[in-house]
Amino acid sequence: MERADKAMRFAEGIATVAANQAVIRLCAILAAKGTIDNAEVEAIRHLHLHSFDSVSGLAETPGPERKALEEVRAIFDKEWGLAQQVPLSGVLRKP
């Protein structure tokens, strides 16, 4: 693969991870504000990780690609766990 192609794939990967993290953090903020509850965060988490598994073809992916996908999925799953924590005490609430 050409260097420019590798660079573009790298940038796309970073952008994808950042976008997924933004969605997870948005859900955490909405939960902290009381807009959605932990059950709704859990439902969104489940759908998000299910979509990731379906799109990535994780079950059929061999070798180093599978390991990389598993690592990224673990990062997302960890961040979802953080999004389900007890709401921040008044930090994001309007007076």
Image (cartoon, grey):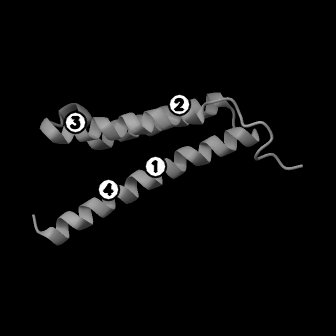
Give the mark, 2 or 4, whose residue is nearer the N terminus: 4
**Foreground disc of the pair 2, 1:** 2
**Side of 6 where 54 appears, left or right:** right
Q: Which mark is residue 20?
A: 1
Q: Is residue 74 visible?
A: yes
Q: Can you identify the residue that label 3 sits on?
A: 67
Q: Residue at x 28, y 42 (%)?
A: 56
Give the mark, 3 or 2, whose residue is nearer the N terminus: 3
Tell me the element at label 4: helix
Q: Which mark is residue 7?
A: none
Q: Residue at x 68, y 44 (%)?
A: 30
* Image location (x, y in percent) of residue 86: 68, 29
Asked if residue 30 is positioned above or below residue 49 in the image, the reply reads: below
Q: Which mark is residue 81?
A: 2
- Quadrant where the image shows the N terminus: bottom left
Find the distance from the CA under tag 3 to the CA under tag 1: 19 Å
Q: Residues within 10 Å of mark 1 (few under 14, many from 20)?
A: some
Find the distance from the CA under tag 2 to the CA under tag 1: 14 Å
- The amino acid type of the residue labelled 4 equals Gly
Q: Quadrant of residue 66?
A: top left
